[in-house]
Image (cartoon, grey):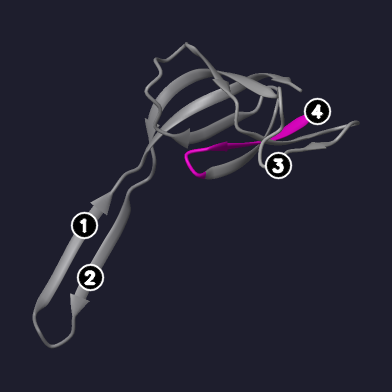
Amino acid sequence: MYAIIEMGGKQFRVEEGTKVLVDRMGAEAGSEVSIDKVLMVGGDDVKIGAPYVDNAKVTATVLDHVRGDKVLVFKHKRRNDSRKLQGHRQDYTAIRVTSILA
């Protein structure tokens, strides 16, 4: 069985035991998190929500808080001796899906 969930404005296809990197959450490492925004539950019996599936819930365990790879942003204007270099690292939370209830 799999589910499509929505977290932080993004959609993820998850199964039991799947490890997913989502945007930074305020939960402590090792705690349980329940996700109610389930868009679809698939498998033998497919349920599609409008927009969310009623009485469907995905529970996950917070593994760790990590940071993504550095992305360099370089801006310049030609013939003006104007340039700017910025770096960015996104904060993520690693979660592991423990169960899907539909």
User: Rounded to the nearest whole Å, what is the CA distance between mark 3 and mark 1?
Assistant: 41 Å
Residue placed at 58% from the left, 38% from the top?
6
The three-letter amino acid code for the residue at tag 3 is: Ala
Tag 1 residue: 86
Tag 4 residue: 1
Tag 3 residue: 50
Tag 2 residue: 75
Q: Residues within 10 Å of mark 4 (few under 14, many from 20)?
A: some
Instruction: Tell me whether circle 3 and circle 2 mark residues in contact (CB < 8 Å).
Output: no
| Mark 3 or mark 4, earlier in chain | 4
Instruction: Tell me whether circle 2 and circle 1 mark residues in contact (CB < 8 Å).
Output: yes
- Mark nearer the viewer, 4 or 1: 4
**Is 94 or 57 nearer to us in this picture?**
57
Q: Which residue reaches farthest left?
A: 81
User: Rounded to the nearest whole Å, what is the CA distance between mark 3 and mark 2?
Assistant: 43 Å
Q: Element at badge 2?
A: strand
Location of residue 94 with respect to 4 vertically, above or below: above
Q: Which mark is residue 7?
A: none
Magenta highlight range: 1-9
User: Rounded to the nearest whole Å, what is the CA distance between mark 3 and mark 4?
Assistant: 20 Å
User: Rounded to the nearest whole Å, what is the CA distance between mark 4 and mark 2?
Assistant: 46 Å
Instruction: Tell me whether circle 3 and circle 4 mark residues in contact (CB < 8 Å).
Output: no
Q: Element at badge 3?
A: loop
Query: At which x and y percent is residue 20?
Result: 56, 32
